[in-house]
Image (tube, coloured by chain):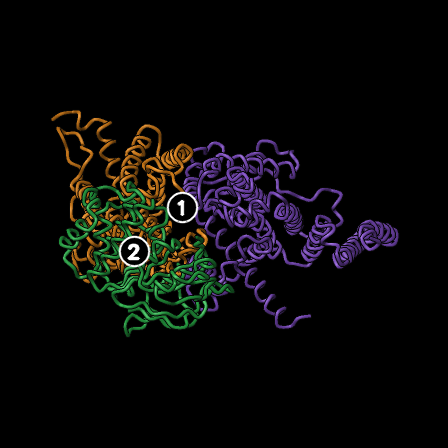
Amino acid sequence: MITIEDLTVSFGAVQALRNVSFVAETGKITAVLGANGAGKTTLLRTISGLKEPKTGTIRLDDQSLVHKRTEDIARLGIGHVPEGRGVIGEFTVEENLRLGAMMARVNLLQGLQEQYELFPVLGERRKQHAAKLSGGERQMLAMARALIAKPSVLLLDEPSLGLAPLVTAQLMHTIQSLCESSDLTVILVEQNATSALRIAHHAVVLHVGKVVANDTAANVSANDNLRQYYLGLVE
Amino acid sequence: MKLIAVRRRVPIAIAIAVAVTIIALVAASTTREGIALSIAFDLAVACGIAMSVPGFKADHPVVSRAALTLLALDVAIFLTFFFSSSTNFNLATGAAMSIVLLGLSFLTGASGQISLGNGAFMGVGAFAMAIWANHHATTPIVLTLLIAVACGALVGLLLGLPATRLRGPYLAGMTLAFAVAFTFILSSFSSWTGGDSGLQLPTAATAPRWLDGFFHAGTPPLTTTTLYITDVAIIVAGVAFFFMANLFASRTGRSMRLIRDNDVAAELVGVSLPRTRVVAFIVSSAYAALGGALLTLIDNSVSPPTYSFALSVTILSLIVIGGIGTISGALIGGVIYAFSTNVISWITTQTGLNPQGNLASQLNGIIFGGLLILTMLFAPFGITGAARQLWHRLRARFPR
Amino acid sequence: MDPFLTSRIVTDVLSGLTNGVTYGLVALSLVLIWRSTGVLNFAQGAMPMFATYLGFAFLSYHFGYWACVVACVIAGLLLGGLTERFLVRGLYGKPEINPIVVMVGFLIVLEAVAAAIWSSTPRSLPSPFSAIHWQLAGKPFALSPFTVYEIATALVVMALVAALFRFTKLGLQLRASALAPEVSRLLGVRVGRLLTLGWMLSTAVGVITAILVSANFFSGLTPTVMDGIFAYGFIAAAIGGLESPVGAIVAGVLLGVVNQFVTDFVNQNAVIIIALGILVVSLMVRPSGVFTKSSQRRV
């Protein structure tokens, strides 16, 4: 469970997040929605310790994450799949996965096996350089690399960006089934609200750094105002 | 409207006023010293007036810089008449060095690159000067200096060609290799460069006849020559600073600074990256050569060990301590260079070190290297930057 | 025996190889640091020199050669680590001239301090192997037991570094933090420690070079013993492309051979001039290095 309270983050004079508070429950998918520049990526980067908050607290269960180093936060079991996926193109698929498994005390071979079962295409291309993969494959690799460490929290930054609708649907399905089969807490940052709301349990809508809605995914979906003004979904 | 018209007339008015005063003084005084003194005083006053006119600097940037240069030259030359011969000698070397520093400051300030070979470029100028003077003893000093500058620029062009495509570390390493290679180049052409012993100038530069009155005939010839050379060095440095100040402010200078700050953006707005980089490098080499040539003139000789890699490092230290990328930094660095030997030997005697000992002989490197590191870590823009910061803080605390 | 082995060409190639491996090692150590931290370490010659002085200070306590070598390497590891922590750490992300200037300053300070403590007089280091060249059918052969030791050590060090990067967990993390520091941190890689480790490793490689160089060359160990080697090492690294360890080593070895031919067929003074010429030309033809595949620029 991730609890965020009164979080304010600024870049110089610009406030990227203002008094953001919400809870991401264990075993649930929390979607963070909003337009470009709403502060979604900043939120994830702050949770991961890549950005220092100005005020506020972030807790993993009962442990404060503020002022911790990024690598220590990762070692607490928070997997962050960054925007643009962040796979290392010069590494092979398997090297990327080995890097992901490095810090966790898991059996490497078993972990690789599990990921190749979850994403069969990665198993086929294990010796290929990640730079040679397609966009969807890279996204899978990035997720597999985070999952192989058996995280308790998964932060996903725009996983559907640049993917074909069919691939996106498949990906969302994978996220959903992962969440159901384990006690994984997922924070899913998306611009693509429709597909995110379809699988999310809870949704937080950000607008210029402020929380404008914090409700169940169903309620957010049903709210026409939100849909129209903040999510850009017009029927 | 009217105000602007008045401002435009100011320089003309001043010029006329100066001319009139000079003529009046010439008529009035009987000794040459008297004339010299009154010219010096008048010039200082005129330049001071010109620069204190509000808005003058903005409306006539070039004239204003010329006035500042004249004022500085005037004061400096006036002072040299009161200094001892050894102080003047130090000042002259400092002036020559400040030209070299100015070139490096421009390279870094304008294009974000760095050269570790400016000592070698200085050597190019120094040897070009000596070789030419040995073959054509009658050439006037100014022309010989220009030839030396041309040689420096040419070598700069040769080495700078690949620099057009390179980023900082490559250029730094390549110029380092040049600095290391330079002494070997000198010995390869020993029939021209005089091998290990170097070259002597055929005749010491002495003041022309018509200046006899100023460079006292009564004093020992060595003192007179030193004084004359010091003043020549100061004037050359003044001209070099004047040109550089204009270059910094020009379109070229501005586009170079854009490259330093963001080369991608610079290319997008149409600044030619390769050309600007190579021009900056050539200018810096040419300035280094000018400084080297002046040093030959001051020392009356040139010897290869002077132009080792250590000199390039000294140059780098001086400009970093003075303030890299700034004009005043070069001036400060030059002054530090002029008196560094004295200061270091003072430290040696004060701390009671054995002057022949290992530590004393290495004090120069330890102090300069240490200052180089500390400056870069804690005040990356050197004394100039620190002074500016202090000034801004004072302004903020005591607003007008 | 075969006169071919003592011919001028073979002699030049083999002596060139002996020097070339040391250039290759310096180039390799430069590339290691450049790739991981984006710093061109101008003190890459001076730091190992200093560590070598420190290590061989134990000689006067009647420790043997090998004990001193170990001491040198340990001193190098410490010096490299401390340098990264206290001198370089604050410079990442600053304009690229800042680390250059600081490392040049460090070079000067180290050389001056070394000369102040141990004097500039050359110091001869003991050698575990004879430097007397073998004779083949009454003619001198290009190699001696010492040069074989030198080449073998260099090759072993190169192979060890390659194996470390290729086959170990540590190597994977080192490569990852060089290529993508932020992503590596998100995966729990302690990038800061790895950068320190990279500097330690690179200095240790340099120390081994310094030990070989100061025992092999007639000059012995002096505060400036690495200056020339550093210049050639840089030239090799730049020709090979600062990004490529293999390119750096190959270029270093080739440069050594070329230098030997120039020494033999032209003269000693021409060596650095021609090396500089090769550098200028190769940079004009392939600005990002002869051995690198892409010329992509990081914006």
Q: Are marks 1 and 2 in contact (CB under 8 Å)?
A: no
Q: Position of residue C39 (x, y in %)?
A: 37, 51
Percent x, y of residue B238: 65, 49
Of the residues shown, which amino acid type is indicated by label 2? Ser
Is disc 2 surrounded by few (<14), some (14 to 19) or many (20+) residues within 10 Å? many
Judge whether C291 appears above or below C103 on screen: above
> Quarter-wise, where is residue A231 in the image?
bottom left
Q: Nearer the viewer, residue A157 or B44?
A: A157
Mark 1 and mark 2 lie on one chain; the one further toward the N terminus is 2
Relative placement, left or right, of A42 versus A86 is right
In the rendered image, which residue does mark 2 sit on? C184
Q: Is residue B83 visible?
A: yes
> Which SS class for mark 2?
helix
Cα–Cα gap, marks 1 and 2? 18 Å
Are dots 1 and 2 on a single chain? yes
Chain C: what color?
A: orange
**Element class at badge 1:** loop
Which chain is tinted green? A
Let me know if residue C23 appears in the view: no
Q: Position of residue C29 (x, y in %)?
A: 29, 48
Residue tagged 1: C298
Shade of chain B as shown in the rendered figure: purple
Whether residue C137 is situated above or below residue A64 in the rendered picture: above
Q: Amino acid at mark 1?
A: Arg
How many circles with numbers are drawn on the protein? 2
Residue drawn at x 40%, y 33% as measured from the top left: C277
Label 1 Cα neighbours within 10 Å, binned few <14 / some 14-19 / many ≥20 = few
* Residue, far bottom: A62
- Residue B161, how many percent across, how many down? 48, 35
Foreground residue among B213 and C217: C217
What chain does mark 2 sit on? C
Front residue of B99/B298: it is: B99
